[in-house]
Image (cartoon, helix red, strand yellow):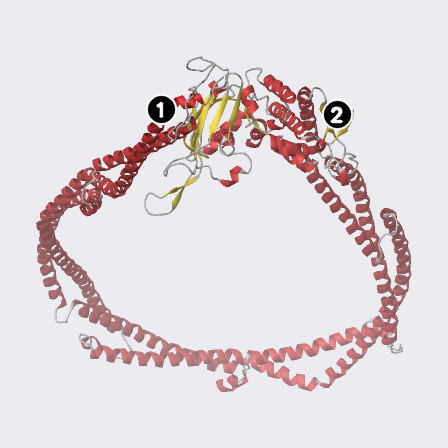
Amino acid sequence: MRLHRLEVEAFGPFAGSVEVDFDRLGADGLFLLHGDTGAGKTTVLDAVAFALYGTVPGARKDGKRLLSDHAPAGSVPTVTLEATIAGRHLRLVRSPEFERLKRRGSGTIKENAKATLTWLDGHGENLSRIPDIADEVGRLMGMSADQFFQVVLLPQGEFAKFLRADTEERGQLLERLFDTTRFETVEEWFLDRRRTSAHELDEHQRSVDVLLARVATAAGIEGGADADPVTWAHKLEDEARETRDLAANDLQEAKGRAKVARDALTEARRVLDLQTRRRRAQTELDTHAAGADQRAVLVAELADARRAEPVATVARDADASRAKAAAAARNVGAITDELRASVGGADLVAELSWPPTADEREHIRAGIRTWRDEIVRLDGALAESAAADRLTVEVERLRARQAELTEAGDALSREREQLPLALREAEKALDSAEKARAALPGLVDTRDRAADAASAAADLRTRRVERDRLERAVHEARDQHQDAREHWLDLMQRRITGMAAELAGTLEDGVPCQVCGSPEHPRPAEPSELSVTKAGEDQARAAEQKAAAALTTATEKLGAAERAIDVLVQRGGDGDADELALALSAAESAVREATALGDQVERRSAFLTELRDRQSRLQERSRDVGADAATVAERIAASTTQLGEIRARVTRAAGDDPSVEDRRARLDALAEAASELLDARDAGAGAESAARELAAKAEALAGDAGFGSIDDAVAAVRTPARRNEIEAALTAARDAEVGARRVLDDPEVAAVADAEPVDLAAVQHAHDAAAEVVDVAVAAASDAERRLLDLERYVGQLDKTAETIAPMQAAHEELAALAEVIAGRGQNARKMSLRSYVLAARLEEVAVSASARLGRMSDGRYEFVHSDEAGPRGRRGGLGLDIRDDYTGVVRSAKTLSGGESFLASLSLALGLADVVAAESGGVVLDTMFIDEGFGTLDADTLDSVMAVLDELRDGGRVVGVVSHVDEMRQRIPSRLHVIRGRTGSTVEVVAG
């Protein structure tokens, strides 16, 4: 990185714009940055840092006071830096965040930070986003802001603290400079792996604990393993196997005893069942013999019912036929009366008689055919009547449509009459809006001029008051200058007049006179009361020059005020303030009105287009409505003519009846009634004939069945339920007799006829006791088998889990030990974590590089000694840094160095650290660096050594800037950047040697 040019404006103590040409200043490779305390030497370095990284070093960035307090109101703090970084020539322009006064009203407003990066070599896209610029600068520089502040802007005070710091503080600084993120990631990786491994090991250990608990539960004990868990589990498994075998033997013995008791119970139940069957069969035979007479009566009743059933069936049929004939006769009478009372039906029934004949049937059929034929003709008339009704509805619909079209046509006519006026109004509105839009720029310009004139008027009043004050100040300064000048001239004249006395005052005896050369001075001139000394004249001259400077300053201020007034007058501010305010108000009102009206151009144009489109649509719609109205009128006329013709035909078809529907309904009712009459007469005649035939058949069947009359036969009839009941009783008695005799004839039943009664309760009790013993044995054997199976399963799982956890336990212990070592604990004797080890290696490189320079600056007396021993009370080690004194051979603490020695050590350490950080950053070439303060503590010889080292830093084209206020440094370094402090802000002066 090489700096070319730095420009600072309204930044820190610099009120105006100052520029530093580093190419000219660093032509010799070494320059001095000096100035009074508080002048702004460090601000120059801050400006370089801010241009590159957008921040400043140390605690100064927390104040956020980068805007100069001396800068005029409205100034923008800006830093511009031209540099070559990584072979790229670029310009960086940055402005920090700052507060400025509001342009209107009181208070302040925050201005955000801004930045631009311009490639002066013409390659690449220029940048304006702060994050993009930060990424690009970081890529080119190869180091962070903290690293830049440490290796380019070498702050000696901080390195003195670093030299005397403890290991923790020293480690914090090194971690900022050297990126140890990847090593921290390794430490965290090992820590996470150890946690994960411990968690997995705990999970498997919990599995072992769960299996041990299950083994204990399966074994039926509450205690846990008292020795090796696997051995203890196998012991419980062997005990369970022995218990299982004993329970199985007990179960077999109990089953043998239970079988004997079960066989005895089965035999007792068999004998008792045979004895019970024999007693039940004998009782059934006795009951059957006692009911013989009652069964004989039932047999006779069933036989009579069976013979009477055919007679009763025919008798019932005869009664049904007679009832049917009577009903038919009643129906014939009712239908005949109905026909006789109806119009057209009396003639049909006038000649009918009973019983019916064939001629009468034909007479009725002829009347039915006549009426059916007339109904067919009436159906055609009904269809025409329905068509007439539909045609009537259509005519009404057409007339309603005709009314709608007429109304629509009238509405369209009215709207077409109103539309031309609306079109003219819309055109006028659009024209006014377009004119307003066209006039808006002129109105805005008028408003801006009025606003500028009003603002100038307000400023003009203030400026004129200021000008009056400045005129009075100029008059006073001129008077004072004249007085001072007259006083000085007077004193100068008086001194010239008394010059002889002044020269006489310098005469000495034997010394030649400066005027005449005589060594004798017989009568030297004597000073008078009006004599003036050179000191008096010089004092008067200084007063005159001061008064002249004050007059010049006052005159310049007055000229500036008058020029400002001229500008304000040219801006129109010399008019009446009220009139200017009214003009501004009118101009703003005109702009608002024109803006509001101009904004309506698009809406009014769209509305005008819509009206024109609507006019075209109305014309087309009017034509369509007229054509539809003509079509509807033609259809109404044709439909009305057709409707009259249909109505006439329907009226003729209705005849004497009120309507065709009534005539058809009457004829249909007559035909239906005649058909019913024909069927009823035939049914009644057939029913009477069938009743006579069935009555004769019933009499014959009763005699054949042995009954004296039909009534006797009917009385002997039994219901199906009664017959079924009798048959069931007889069948049950017969089956009971057969079953009882079969049981008594069974050899097994006969064999127990003389046997003693069985005591089943005693045998059952013995069987139940034996079964209970078997159940207990079965439960014991099942429980023993279940326990053994559970133990075998759990012990097997325990064996597999134990085999799995053993290598896992070993791996975890190895990983935990390694993680402890990496974290600086455990077997790590030096208590150095991986990060500390890396930092210790970097510190060792820094110590080697710094020792080379410290040796040259101390004439070979001192060198740095790096120590990687552990710190006290378990603190991390590897960051120890002491000083070896070659005069004594003793390694001592850096805290024992004197002030000058501490400066040499700090400077060496800073330079060594810069070398290591540059190498760490990929070999970044640091063509420019600054060294800040500390040279005042050195004696002349040591300063020579330091300057020799600084001269070495210039090798290879490097530029080194030394920041110091020591006077001797000005003699040693001819190229200087002088920062000059002033009441109105600091300025800079470049002195190139």
In depth, the one of 9 and 761 nearer the eye is: 9
**Label 2: few (<14), some (14–19) or many (≥20) C-alpha neighbours in 10 Å:** some
The residue mark sitting in front, 2 or 1, is 1
Query: In this orientation, does residue 874 appear?
Result: yes
The percent coordinates of residue 313 (x first, y second) are 48, 78
**For residue 587, which numbered disc appears in the image?**
none
Q: Which residue is mark 1?
A: 497
Residue at image position (57%, 82%) is: 304
Left or right of 833 on screen, residue 496: left
Give above or below for 429 relative to 748: above
The percent coordinates of residue 86 (x first, y second) are 52, 21
**Label 1: few (<14), some (14–19) or many (≥20) C-alpha neighbours in 10 Å:** some
Left or right of 789 on screen, residue 6: left
In depth, the one of 292 and 929 nearer the eye is: 929
Pick whichever of labels 2 and 1 is earlier in the sequence: 1
The percent coordinates of residue 203 (x first, y second) are 73, 46
Q: Which residue is mark 2?
A: 885
In depth, the one of 802 and 628 nearer the eye is: 802
Residue at image position (51%, 77%) is: 310
The percent coordinates of residue 94 (x first, y second) are 44, 31
Dot 2: element: strand
Query: In this orientation, does residue 354 appear?
Result: no
Q: Amino acid at mark 2?
A: Asp
Residue at image position (78%, 42%) is: 805
